[in-house]
Image (cartoon, coloured by chain):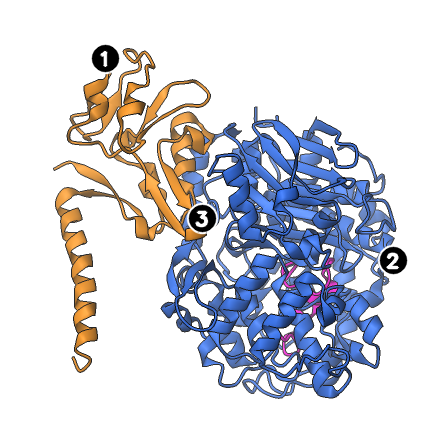
Amino acid sequence: MVWKRRIAYINLTTGKIVVKPIPKEVRQLYLGGRGINMYLLYNHVKPEVDPLSPENCLFVGTGLLCGIPALGSGRCDIAAKSPITGGVGDSNIGGFFAPELRLAGFDHLAVSGKAEKPVYLWIDNGNIEIRDASHLWGKDTFETQDIIRKDNEDEEVKCLVIGVAGENLVRFANVRTGMKNSAGRTGMGCVMGSKNLKAIAAHGTMDIEFSHPDELLDYCREMNKMIMKTRWTRAQSRWGTLIIYSNTNTTGLVRTRNFQLNRLEEGEDLEPESMDKYTVGMSGCYGCTVHCRHRYILREGPYAPIFAEGPEYTSLGAFGTMVDCKKMETVLAANHLVNKYGLDTLETGGLIAWAMELYEKGIIDEKRTAGLKLEWGNEEVLFELITQIAHRKDFGNLLADGFKTAIAKIGKGSEYYAIQIKGMSNLHSDERPTPSLALGIATSTRGADHLRSRPAIDLYGLPEELLQEIYGAPVSSDYTSYEGKSRMVWWQELLYAVTDSIGICKFQTVFCAVHAPKWREFAKLIQLTTDMRITEAQLMEIGERIYTIERMFNLREGFSRKDDTLPERYFKEPTLTGLPIAKGKKIDKNKFEEMLNEYYTLHGWDEKGRPKKETLEKLGLDKEPSHKI
Amino acid sequence: MQKILFIDQEKCSGCRICESVCSLYHEKVCNPARGRIHIVKWETAGLYVPMVCQQCEIPLCEVVCPMHAIKRDGETGAMLIDYDLCVGCRLCVMFCPFGGINLDTKTGKVLKCDLCGGEPLCVMFCESQALQYLNATAINLRKRRAAAEKFSDLIKKMLPSV
């Protein structure tokens, strides 16, 4: 039966495990993955709970389409109250863990409490065991996976693990699987660490059933063809996400030296072509035809030998442009190091870049940094700080608590230089020339973040007829314009909420590729896999429900309209470099507020960003929490 | 000339789509453990090798089968199991040098690649072309061309002026 899938509630304090089915009515409202995780987060984590306390819950969820041979259907969603923002914590990870969890008999896990000593979860064909992980404590994210496989004499085991950063409760520690994949953002690895939970390991040989397997096979083939026909995907297959670097850097959309410049000069070595001398092949996540990540080897040089996978475009920023390091080799080595420790690259790079600017401005000195000279482009300092952060040593210990605490401790106007929203670092993109991208990072429910809404296709200057067709109302094709951009952000927020809930990769929907699968194709895939008939309009409403329940969670934690804003510098300092279209740009405060008003209206929220009564009624959220699961 | 399921291991991206479509097509469920093809991975070394029945010229599975239940299909060249004759002794599993025959974890049946009757789905879905369905001549030429390419690269390096 397609509907026999289950959720396991695991209490690490008592060791009690309860397994329940996930009713179809919950699926119809929230689908799976992020949607169900957000429903669980709202209902199971009580207001004002300390994110590091046993009362916080960690939710692991597979998408509704998990397992299909298309569109990167192996995405796994990990959620909890965030130790960085105090609001919605939610991070999405590719790789092979989600299908393995499903093959092992579970769709969702809800982990509460705190184990007395380090443990890991062993999940095997319908059974869950809490096992001792004392021998894994202190091991890096790669070693941990290898040891678990060896211990169980099973090479097929897939694991979600934390590194020493998670053990040491670094607030932005991540959760990792395989060589490359990270649930990077919002500190989910820190929550695992706070529960003494080192890993979740799964291996299963149970069937994943679909309602119409033969038609599904044909349609999956059609979907893979559709996505591989797009130029973006073909480029990504060759260069990975590094392909974004050339265009954005030339245009002037890349923050450099924290936020001083919007283009890295003489940064040719960070161009995607540089990867050729390190790459030995590409590698893909489960069910993905794109395979966007490099398998690379550093054979010589100061950091050799390293075999690893990646790096993402965002790591080029974190350990390249933002800290003014201009060598691919440095980025590759730093990328590997944070992966070993289990740190979020974006948050780590963002904090180090901020500290370097504070050092330059004289806001912090060597007394504060325990002798470290935080000069731009100083590789030694970069590697030292990464290690200090992971081990909570010296100056790194201050940064390990994230922006909110570090700003409070340093004071002296340091907040002005922090490129963060709701306490979470932005990636290395500079959104001053692009109002749609700027609005998106401001409204994101998990803090400064591009993966809640980024309408990357805005940068293509598409014909307005096409934009109207996609977004359902007029949208300017000029990416520096404010016209229609609130609609773009709203629409993308709904699309990504659904994408994360059916569990496919964002790169295989309308994110960077225009002619990619979206509502209609999603509806058909849902019908073929589960026999649920959901219209395109209903799918958008599900996206609205998920985004609104996230909003409700944040409002309950004290967030309000004032938190949906940009770092002050976006409004004050115009961009200094880039193409003429991107030069001299800053965000107009009044126009920004106007966009925000339009955005709230589109969501059915009031001018303070609170969902209106009729919106809650329409979405069935007025009776929450309903505790159906 | 019969076609051959050809594996170019270097192109495999490890996405497991072949495993998933194989089980979906044959067993109507997604379950790599019940598929006929398997990507063997050494994740931390970045090595992925798709393993599947090679439809050998001298098939040990056929030789050892006490029930004569494994026979070659005249059209596709695939070695096929006649389940009316098979008693599930698993000798074929034991003797296959590649692990090309596996056990269905649910039914206990032995499973092997049947080339989907001449249109292998794994090949159809393999975007990186690590799996190809080619005639033997094409495979020979392709291998030689690839080797020659490496050779000419080497010559270019030795004679920088060329």
Q: Quadrant of the C terminus of chain A?
A: top right
Asked if marks 2 and 3 touch (Cβ < 8 Å), the reply is: no
Mark 2 crowd level (few <14, some 14–19, many ≥20, 10 Å Cα): few
Chain for numbered disc 1: B
x, y (%) of residue A327?
48, 77
Prevailing SS of the magenta stretch: loop
Mark 3 crowd level (few <14, some 14–19, many ≥20, 10 Å Cα): some
User: Which residue is found at the position 61% from the left and 83% from the top?
Assistant: A376
Q: Colour of chain B?
A: orange
Chain for numbered disc 3: B
In the image shown, does A626 or A59 lie closer to the viewer? A59
> Which chain does blue denote in the image?
A
User: Which residue is found at the position 84% from the left and 67% from the top?
Assistant: A562
Asked if marks 2 and 1 touch (Cβ < 8 Å), the reply is: no
**Residues at marks 2 and 3, CA–CA distance in whole angstroms:** 44 Å
Is residue A351 found left or right of A281 in the rendered image? Answer: right
Q: What element carries label 1?
A: loop
Q: Would you place residue A478 above or below residue A182 in this image?
A: below
The residue that disc 3 covers is B43
Q: Is mark 2 on a helix, strand or loop?
A: loop
Range drawn in magenta = A429-453
What amino acid is labelled 3 in the image? Glu
